[in-house]
Image: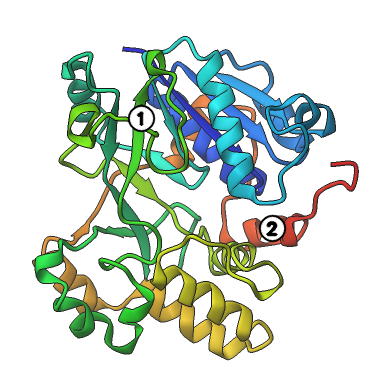
Amino acid sequence: MRWDIVTTAFEPTAVTLGFLAHHVDLGVNKIWLHLDAPNSELESLVGDHPQIQIINCNAAYWAASSNGERPWDFRIRQTINADAAMAQSSADWIAHIDADEYVTNESALFAFLQKQPDEVLTVVVPNGERVHRRGGRQPHIFTGTFRLPFPPRIHRALPLLYGKHAKYLQKGLAGYWHGKAFTRVSSGLPLALHRAKLPEGMKVHEGQREFSEQAILHFDGMTKAHWLDKMRKKAPGGKVLKPHNPARIRQAQDVWDNRDNGPYLDHLYQHVKEINGAQQILLNLLGRGKAFDVDVPAKIKAVFPHANVDLTPEAVDAALKDIQDGRVPTAF
């Protein structure tokens, strides 16, 4: 089975390189990497790797796109790029995922995809979300454990686990909980962000299936600064982009409203994106905590042996400063 992934990235080089190395190591057919802004450092490291197709989303690219110009909303840029990759792909399946999302549990997932009858056009893949132990040192940006979304029947556990900060979580996750999709390339369906758009008149149960296990790892914020930057992009000028789930809206709005209050933002991050030892134990007992073996630094060394990137949080934060606030050349 041949599978592709498509993403639009505007990240520090180390973040994108880890994403590429991980999926090349898994045997991806092609990664359609749309660079939302130029990154000559990354291009020099990737070179002409046969499994990676770099597309620079410059002024000429957007002029020739289906939109005719560069959309202001980054989510629209993502969907346009995803549909362009779908139209060019020669794979069997394609997934539209972000540069902080990693496919895992691949053996079971790909076996499931191969078993699907032709009428199944898209498969939803559940996700987990990376969290850090509060007060622990992060040796590199890919460390941590993962929490899984709660089923509705045990939502009552959330206030016990997170207290007043439960309002910032939906089903126990700070980010999304409803997975991403692998879609048949032959279907030609619009990919959107989380679900492919089924043909008009087709019922969900007819054209869509759901994989039963977590197979997407969401590193929702490589560092605190990375997460705060992500929240700011969701609320340009203080207006939160819709639609987002209510918990995500609260996060983004609070980050904006308290953008100059460092202690408040520290506290918010500690209680939304980190967990203590007791919370870890309870998550494990409830079946909502899980460790995944994703040795991204080793994969970078194996796939890009000449790359010398610093994966420490401090180095990634320093690189992030160069691209914060969505800085893009004015010609775009």
Observer-nearest of 74 and 213? 74
Disc 2, SS: helix
Q: Residue 207 at x, y = what percent?
A: 24, 27
Residue 130 horizontal/vertical position (percent): 36, 58
The residue located at (47%, 9%) in the rendering is 90
Q: Earlier in the sequence, mark 1 or mark 2?
A: 1
Quarter holding the C terminus? top right
- Position of residue 271 relative to residue 198, above or below, is below
- Residue 218 x/y as whole percent: 39, 51
Kindly identify which residue carries mark 1.
200
Identified by mark 1, the residue type is Glu
Instruction: Sort mark 2 into few (<14), some (14-19) or many (20+) by Cα contacts within 10 Å.
Output: some
Front residue of this view, candidates 244 and 162: 244
- Which residue occupies 16% across, 17% down? 115
Q: In this view, does 203 lie above or below 185?
A: below
Instruction: Give left or right: position of 212 versus 330.
Output: left
As rendered, which of 284 and 180 lies closer to the eye? 180
Judged left or right of residue 310, residue 201 is left
Q: Residue 320 carries which label?
A: 2
Q: What's under tag 2, amino acid-wise?
A: Leu
Residue 252 percent across, percent down from the top left: 54, 72
